[in-house]
Amino acid sequence: FSGIVMAPFGAVGIRSDSGVLRELVYLPKSYAEKAPMDALTERAAQQIIHYLHNPDFCFDLPLAAIGTVFQRKVWAQIVAIPRGDVLTYGEVARLVQSAPRAVGQACGANWFPLVIPCHRVTAAGGLGGFSHDDEVNGFHVGVKRWLLTHEGVVDL
């Protein structure tokens, strides 16, 4: 990682290269903070810290052109979900004219969690999985629960 920011749920690993953000990764508490190695990583770290203190913070980071056309279409719908709201996989699927499972796969393939807030997409009957983690008490589902609570979502 080119930097690691501590968070209430663990940490966020940052990878940047050639002036673009390459990846954000949710990490367990066993990871130690790592000072940013470059200006973009410093900018990303500061924006993550701002978000962790203020869920209304809007990210403004250059993202690498990663993902398929379909994934980017799903991610564009996810970015449009306001803080405090959620859509189900089925609702996003209707918006992109696809199937809920395909939307779930695109969410799991998101390289930029927080910036593309895939935690705002839930199952029809509750929280659902997160980052390909379907365990009710799994690490990533716990991160999703924390993020939604941080953003004011209470009924999940």
Image: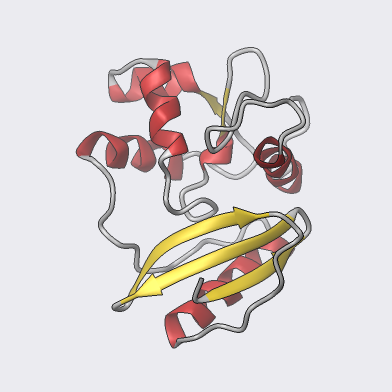
Q: Residue furthest front?
A: 30
Closer to the camera in the image, 1 or 147: 1
Q: Where is 7 relative to 17, above or below?
A: above
Residue beneath the point at 28% across and 53% down: 66
**Which residue is at a point 45% across and 16% down the rendered structure image?**
90
Q: Quick check: 36 above or below 67?
A: below
- Residue 28 relative to residue 13: left or right: right
Residue depicted at 49% across the width and 63% down the height = 59
Image x and y of residue 68, in percent: 23, 41
In percent of the image, x 65 and y 70: which residue is there? 5
- Residue 155 position, x and y percent, is 76, 25
The percent coordinates of residue 41 (x first, y second) are 48, 78
Q: Looking at this rendering, what residue extends furthest in the left direction?
A: 69
Image height of 130 relative to 112, above or below: above
User: Where on the picture, by quarter, is residue 76?
Assistant: top left
Quadrant, the C terminus: top right
Q: How is the image coloured?
A: secondary structure
**Left or right, residue 29 beside residue 13:** right
Q: Nearer the viewer, residue 73 or 81?
A: 73
Give the percent coordinates (x, y) of residue 52.
70, 62
Left or right: where 33 falls relative to 62: right
